[in-house]
Amino acid sequence: MSLEGKTVVLGVTGSIAAYKAPPLARKLQSKGAEVIVVMTEAGTKLVDPLTFRSLTGRAVPVDMFEPSTDWQIEHISLSEKADLFLIAPATANTIGKMANGIADNLLTCAVMATKAPVLIAPAMNVNMYENPIVQENIKRLEELGYTFVGPKVGRLATGIEGKGPLADVDDILAKAEELLKGR
Ligand SMILES: Cc1cc2nc3c(=O)[nH]c(=O)nc-3n(C[C@H](O)[C@H](O)[C@H](O)COP(=O)(O)O)c2cc1C
């Protein structure tokens, strides 16, 4: 199993493609990875954290100020535990935050604190994806050493064709394996 002994922190944000994150978590587990899911508030509107809790057997942290969340432990330990930080799907908003040093939720805070490789799988409407601000943010993150997979060209939730849908689970997995090889 190619990901045996590896911990993947899977960040799930508020994209319509969030429904593809549970199968992705499953696939990572089937390759031997320990998967810890962290969600943004918007992400929880699209997929119930209980889904990930059931799949991973772990609490799904969202809010670092929630009294039951020991945020000191959460955001630092998430960052330290990760062999790979995978954000799939990644919204334009979260990409923008990461590119500009904003860490105002548990996910962006943990990403900022990690030394692990960060793999980002964007998913958004084609017009959002082509927006020069989004393109600038992606370019900036790539220059800083973040890795991107997708989006692919396909049919968007709105029915139009374009570049924006989340990369296929197998392509995300292949990129994750590539980044973890030899680590
Ligand atoms: C039904 C629905 C689907 C959405 N899908 C996307 C999407 O695919 N990509 C995206 O960048 N934003 C999408 N958004 C907008 C984000 O949810 C919004 O920008 C949010 O603030 C993102 O927060 P987050 O980055 O903290 O998860 C969607 C919003 C709604 C209501």
Image: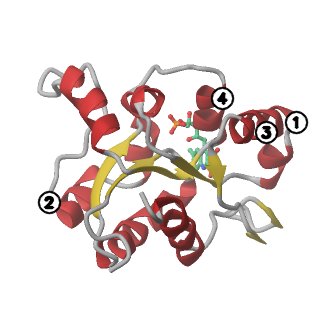
Q: Earlier in the sequence, mark 4 or mark 3?
A: 4
Q: Which residue is mark 2?
A: 57
Task: Please name which of the two marks, 2 or 3, marks the residue nearer to the observer.
Answer: 3
Q: CA distance from mark 4 to mark 1?
A: 13 Å
The mark lying in front, picked from 3 and 1, is: 3
Q: Which quarter shows the N terminus?
A: bottom left
Q: Which mark is residue 139?
A: 3
The quadrant of the rendering that contains the C terminus is: bottom left
Q: Is 145 left, or right, of 132 in this rendering?
A: left
Which residue in the structure is indicated by mark 4?
99
Is residue 145 depicted above or below 155 in this figure? Answer: above
- Residue density around tag 3, few if under 14, some if 14–19, many if 20 or more, within 10 Å: some
Q: Amino acid at mark 1?
A: Pro
Q: As rendered, which of 17 and 27 lies closer to the eye?
A: 27
What residue is drawn where x is 16% and y is 53%? 58
Secondary structure of residue under mark 4: helix
Give the foreground label among 4 and 1.
4
Report helix, strand or loop for mark 3.
helix
Image side of residue 97 versus residue 56, left or right: right
Quadrant hosting residue 149: bottom right
* Residue type, mark 4 in image: Ala
Q: Is tag 2's residue or tag 4's residue first in the polypeptide sequence?
A: 2
Q: Which amino acid, mark 3?
A: Lys
Q: Contact, CB < 8 Å: mark 4 with mark 3?
A: no
Tag 3 near tag 1, CB within 8 Å = no
**Residue drawn 19% across the image and 27% down it:** 73
CB of mark 2 within 8 Å of CB of mark 4? no
- Report how far apart the C-alphas of labels 4 and 3 lie in the structure: 9 Å
Left or right: 147 as drawn, with respect to 70: right
Report the residue at 69% width, 62% height from top: 150
Q: How far from the left and from the top, in percent, is residue 134?
A: 77, 37
